[in-house]
Amino acid sequence: MVNNSLVQFIREARRRGFDDLKIKESLLSNGWELLIIEEGFASIKPPIHFKNKVCIYLDSDVLKLLEKRSKRNLMTISEQIEDILRRSVINAKNTTHSKEKLDDMLVGLFSRKTRKK
């Protein structure tokens, strides 16, 4: 069950111009659990109508790195993966492929380029 006062707080903070990261930081610093905060944000998130759905299987090492990064960025793992993919696609036009960044490890799973063994 979603906490109604939490949802009201999130809506009011957004109305006042605070971004979600600042709202999450504020709630965490005041003793709210991350899972409860995520449930509050998820309850007011507009429904997404997917044109395509992607299912991936991740190596446990990659998953651990994603979990660490998503906690640091106050995101769920799904949000973190979506963020990484979005930024990688946008930045692909502007970068050369010299050294892959940590975020690009996930994109490597979807690419057709040959992998080093």
Image (cartoon, helix red, strand yellow):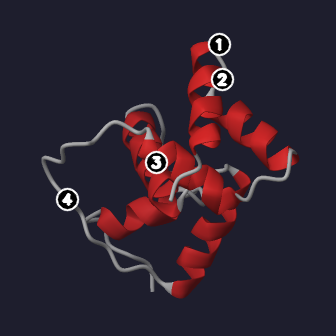
Secondary structure found at label 3: helix
> How far separated are the C-alphas under marks 4 and 2?
32 Å
Q: Report the side of 19 relative to 105 (left or right).
A: right
Residue 28, position in %: x, y?
79, 49
Q: Residues within 10 Å of mark 4 (few under 14, many from 20)?
A: few
- The circle drawn on residue 16 is 1
The amino acid sitting under disc 3 is Ala
- The circle drawn on residue 13 is 2
The amino acid sitting under disc 1 is Arg
Residue 3, position in %: x, y?
59, 49
Q: Viewer-nearest of labels 4 and 2?
A: 2
Q: Report the side of 71 relative to 116 (left or right).
A: right
Counting residues from the start of the chain, the first of labels 1 and 4 encountered is 1
The amino acid sitting under disc 4 is Lys
Among the 4 quarters of the image, the one containing residue 7: top right
Viewer-proximal residue, 5 or 82?
A: 5
Counting residues from the start of the chain, the first of labels 1 and 3 encountered is 1
Q: What residue sits right under mark 3 in the picture?
A: 42
Instruction: Name the residue at 45% across, 36% down.
Output: 91
> How far separated are the C-alphas under marks 2 and 1?
5 Å
Counting residues from the start of the chain, the first of labels 2 and 3 encountered is 2
The amino acid sitting under disc 2 is Ala
Q: Residues within 10 Å of mark 3 (few under 14, many from 20)?
A: few
Secondary structure found at label 4: loop
